[in-house]
Amino acid sequence: MHILVSGGLGYIGSHTCLVLLEAGHTISIVDNLINSKIETLEKLRIISTSDFQFYQCDILDYEHLETIVHEGNVDGIIHFAGLKSVGESVSNPLEYYRVNLNTTINLTRLAVKYKIPRFVFSSSATVYGSAKSPLVESQKLLPTTNPYGETKAMCEKILNDASQANPNLGVTLLRYFNPIGAHESGLIGENPNGTPNNLMPYITQVAKGKLEKLKIFGNDYPTNDGTGVRDFIHVMDLAKGHVAAIEKQKSGVQVYNLGTGKGTSVLEIIKTFERVNNLEIPYEFIERRNGDIAEVYANVLKVGKELGWKTERNIEDMCRDAWRFENQNSQYEEEKFSELWK
């Protein structure tokens, strides 16, 4: 199949592109480079032996996007593109609604117009709001705790309605949990601009000496060690879930959780990272963040039964691969910087 991947140079998108290529699919990556780096394109070409197309395009630009879809003979769409910081969404909600909803609407309009039968959407466990874990796909969604989560829930609704009005449009909504880790090559991984919002790149940057210490939001939750519990999943397992979803796409709308089905606390992640990489991570506890809840993890029975997908990598693998990427990426950036000043 020929798959158009929006946001394909981002963290999860880039890993999914590699798995799609390994599975024999043809891909076209569309990315505006706001939350990604052009260097990732070079790294994908180093890792993969298969060629692919890249288009620098803002998905809010409907006309430009349509020329790409029209010329590409696209069989399916995997939609990652959008703004993704929970904290930023609270301080700048209008931009999150503008970008996340309109990118989804543009891609859905084109999927309907060009009769593209497969559409996989990058959703999130945030759509469950403050519901008690384990979270099950069939449960009623509660109001989300932040505008980012609200945009994901709204996009799910948009795609549900579009599929009902256009029965040939098959949609899969993938609600995934907390991706960490990196590709085993160490060439691609989570590489945020500025101070990281997510736990693992914050840990690796502290380990590398780029940041002084890790700040942990809260140690008074009703959990085993007082820190928040999340369902951490290796990004490569997550990527394979997207490929399984688009290959086994059905008509109508399908919803799947992508997680391990097990919760791990923030402190457990830190201690595992220290142990497998023989490092010490300085940290301090600070006040809880608004909107955070104590425990979030998935029920993954449905995705295993219907897609035959399950995770293969454990927390140790996630910590080991993330640290490898931090080291490889730091070396890569230093070499690029040196080349500029030769």
Image (cartoon, grey):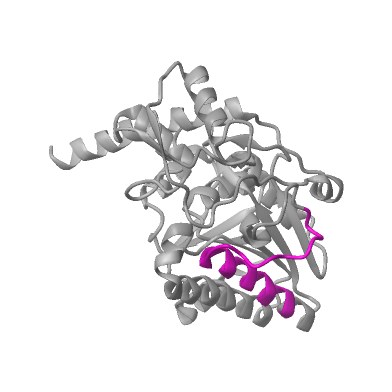
Quarter that holds the C terminus: top left
Residue 283 or 312: which is nearer the viewer? 283
Vertical placement of residue 222 versus 207, above or below: below
Q: Looking at the rendering, which quadrant does residue 207 occupy?
A: top left
Whether residue 55 sits left or right of residue 246 in the image: it is left
User: Quarter holding the N terminus?
Assistant: bottom right
Q: Which residue lies furthest to the left in this view?
A: 342
Quick check: is 156 in the magenta stretch? Answer: yes
Residue 287 location in percent, x, y?
43, 46
Instruction: Name the foreground residue: 184 vs 323.
Output: 323
Instruction: Farthest residue to the right: give it.
Output: 305
- Res. 191 in view: yes
Q: Which residue is drawn at 70% across and 56% down?
A: 131
Q: Where in the figure is residue 237, as x and y percent of width and height?
A: 65, 40
Q: Is residue 280 above or below residue 6?
A: above
| Magenta-drawn segment | 136-161
**Is residue 127 found left or right of 10 in the rendered image?**
right
Residue 85 visible to the viewer = no
Q: In this view, does 129 lie to the left or right of 193?
A: right
- Residue 94 % position (x, y): 44, 76
Q: Give the residue drawn at x 76%, y 60%.
A: 255
**Residue 283 quadrant:** top left
Q: Where is residue 306 in the image (x, y as percent from the top left)?
A: 85, 51
Question: Number of labelled discs?
Answer: 0
The image quarter containing residue 151 is bottom right
Image point 25% across, 39% down: which residue?
336
Q: Residue at x 32, y 49 (%)?
A: 194
**In this rendering, is residue 107 above or below 229?**
below
Residue 340 belongs to the span the image colors magenta: no
